[in-house]
């Protein structure tokens, strides 16, 4: 059999901006596919792109891969690399492509997509035509646009590593075959590889899916429904702290808190446009009194109904309404990922309704508010993506040119006023308005998109929203959507990974564990605990039969900030012996001194 495959590689550079490294990774994916097909000649191959920090390839193989298989494949890859075989590109027509890949059904489907026009080798829409081309190296042939390095010898055999195997549905569709996806990484030097592997180990240690289970915070249950989070008491305590803080800051910031239902009639979602553009992400309707109702995927239409419940004047504006509203969206099972991708989540929505002359001040106000909130949770590095309309296709967008120009200018002015690094992307605005997305950087240098500030020129028109202006005439209000944390579930998952589960004192579900050395010290520990609780601290007493060392280890495993050891000496002096979760020993201090120390850490929202 002629060995053949298909790579899902784009022409863009890798995320580090190193074009050569991107080509190295793309080429390594081809080398891996060759090694796999040599081991499993009957194997079927799907797509294999270069990705941020590595590459992957999807295979349909006769049996599940083992760690030993990966070792063998990696060893064979090094041999292929050392053979220094050239990569050669060749263009071909559809008939030739089908003949080359006649025994590869996934390639045949992709050839269909490419030949039909407007789709790339992923089956994704692209501008213009996509040529059919192949890359050869040795006996391996791959349907691919490239680019590649000149030969396999440009790949450093000492800087390559296969990482793991994961399941991946073909085309991300759980109704299609489940494939085996091999992830790998390759770098220019062995030192860079080792640095990445160390970083990857830290990522795994911080994986929120593991930590929320170990720390007894949140769980998921297939019998209750995939993608639905169950908050345990300690996780619920942290969530309550986050939500209470969120509400207090919003009230201080001039917002009013509202609450809306979880379901709405089909007619509402028709007016909003969700049933036209978003139905595949909505749950199936439920029949109530012969009328279809839907679980809400968004809160916006409900806020608009509240707005329309009364006649609004320019004197009433701006209105700033915020809600912690739980929404439900259908996500394919293949993309569910712990708390980061769920089917039911609480979105921290806010909507601002204002007049055109108020919009500039409101945008700067909401930007400052968002940045200050994110800083409160320990994030200090921000980047912004400004998405604006395509100037060459104004007919694709709702709203008047003047509205778009004013909206884009107000977003840009706010970004520049706060001297934020930003990227302006034309054509990335949704049809109903421009937006800015705020990205934060976590402790491992990873970026996460959190806050979105989105104009909407479409919904006010659809719902015939008006206010009475100074001239006594009706006018359309400007409407701005704002999700600050994104969703409580996803934000919590990010927080867990950012802090590796060791939350700052103000967020820790248990701020101190009191550890009596032996049973006769328990009574004193309980009395101290009462004083700490009265001071507003969250504490527990470990009165188990474990030895003191085991109690300390348990508290450290649970990432409790403070451990207060109590024995005869502490009882006699009416003190506690303070130990921190980072193993620093502060020693004996009065109970009042500890209360002051802990309250100061809470007030400052610092780690310890």
Image: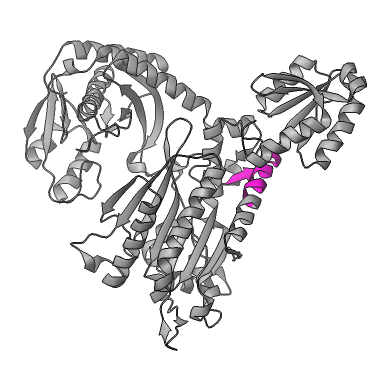
Residue at 71% of width from left, 25% of height from top? 555
Residue 236: x, y in percent? 67, 44
Q: Is residue 236 magenta?
A: yes
Residue 292: x, y in percent? 51, 70
Residue 572: x, y in percent? 92, 20
* Furthest residue in direction bottom, as rendered: 472
Q: Is residue 495 magenta?
A: no
Report the number of discs: 0
Main SS, magenta residues:
helix
Residue numbers of the magenta segment: 227-243
Left or right, residue 211 beside residue 389: right
Residue 329 visible at all: no
Question: 604 and 274: which one is in front?
Answer: 604
Image quadrant where one finds the C terminus: top right
Residue at 77% of width from left, 42% of height from top? 536
Question: 106 and 475: which one is in front?
Answer: 475
Residue at 56% of width from left, 44% of height from top? 376
């Amino acid at each position: 059999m002629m060995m053949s495959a298909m790579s899902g590689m784009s022409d863009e550079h890798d995320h580090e901006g190193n074009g050569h490294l991107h080509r190295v990774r793309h080429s390594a994916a081809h080398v891996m596919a060759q090694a796999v097909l040599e081991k499993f000649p009957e194997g079927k191959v799907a797509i294999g792109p270069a990705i941020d920090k590595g590459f992957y390839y999807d295979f349909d193989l006769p049996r599940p891969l083992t760690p030993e298989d990966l070792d063998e494949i990696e060893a064979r890859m090094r041999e292929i690399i050392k053979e220094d075989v050239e990569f050669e590109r060749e263009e071909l027509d559809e008939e030739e492509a089908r003949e080359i890949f006649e025994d590869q059904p996934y390639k045949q489907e992709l050839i269909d997509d490419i030949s039909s026009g407007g789709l790339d080798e992923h089956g994704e829409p692209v501008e213009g035509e996509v040529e059919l081309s192949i890359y050869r190296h040795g006996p391996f042939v791959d349907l691919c646009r490239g680019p590649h390095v000149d030969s396999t010898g440009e790949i450093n055999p000492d800087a390559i590593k296969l990482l793991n195997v994961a399941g991946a549905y073909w085309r991300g569709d759980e109704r299609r075959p489940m494939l085996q996806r091999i992830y790998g990484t390759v770098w220019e030097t062995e030192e860079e590889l080792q640095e990445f592997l160390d970083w990857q180990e830290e990522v795994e240690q911080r994986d929120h899916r593991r930590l929320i289970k170990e720390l007894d915070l949140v769980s998921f249950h297939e019998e209750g429904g995939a993608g639905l989070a169950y908050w345990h008491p300690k996780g619920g305590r942290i969530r309550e702290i986050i939500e209470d803080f969120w509400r207090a800051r919003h009230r201080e910031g001039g917002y009013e808190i509202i609450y809306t239902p979880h379901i709405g009639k089909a007619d509402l979602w028709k007016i909003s446009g969700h049933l036209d553009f978003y139905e595949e992400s909505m749950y199936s309707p439920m029949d109530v009194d012969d009328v279809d109702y839907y679980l809400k995927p968004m809160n916006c239409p409900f806020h608009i109904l509240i707005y329309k419940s009364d006649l609004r004047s320019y004197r009433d504006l701006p209105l700033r309404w915020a809600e912690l509203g739980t929404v439900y969206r259908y996500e394919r099972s293949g993309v569910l990922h712990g708390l980061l991708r769920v089917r039911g989540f609480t979105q921290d929505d806010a909507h601002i309704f204002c007049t055109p002359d108020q919009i500039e001040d409101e945008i700067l106000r909401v930007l400052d508010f968002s940045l200050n909130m994110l800083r409160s949770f320990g994030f200090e590095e921000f980047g912004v993506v400004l998405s604006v309309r395509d100037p060459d296709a104004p007919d694709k967008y709702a709203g008047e040119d003047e509205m778009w120009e004013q909206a884009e200018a107000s977003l840009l002015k706010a970004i520049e006023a706060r001297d934020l690094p930003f990227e302006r992307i034309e054509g990335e605005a949704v049809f109903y308005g421009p937006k800015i997305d705020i990205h934060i950087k976590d402790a491992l240098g990873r970026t996460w998109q959190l806050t979105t500030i989105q104009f909407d020129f479409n919904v006010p028109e659809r719902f015939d929203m008006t206010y009475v202006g100074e001239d006594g005439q009706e006018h359309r209000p400007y409407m701005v959507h704002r999700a600050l944390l994104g969703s409580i579930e996803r934000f919590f998952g990010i927080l867990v990974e950012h802090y590796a589960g060791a939350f700052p004192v103000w967020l820790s579900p248990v701020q101190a564990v009191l550890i009596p050395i032996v049973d006769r010290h328990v009574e004193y520990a309980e009395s101290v605990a009462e004083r700490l609780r009265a001071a507003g601290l969250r504490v527990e007493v470990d009165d188990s039969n474990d030895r003191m060392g085991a109690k300390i280890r348990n508290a450290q495993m649970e990432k409790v900030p403070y451990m207060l050891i109590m024995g005869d000496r502490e009882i006699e002096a009416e003190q506690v012996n303070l130990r921190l979760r980072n193993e620093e020993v502060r020693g004996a201090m009065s109970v009042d001194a500890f209360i002051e120390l802990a309250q100061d850490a809470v007030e400052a929202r610092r780690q310890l």
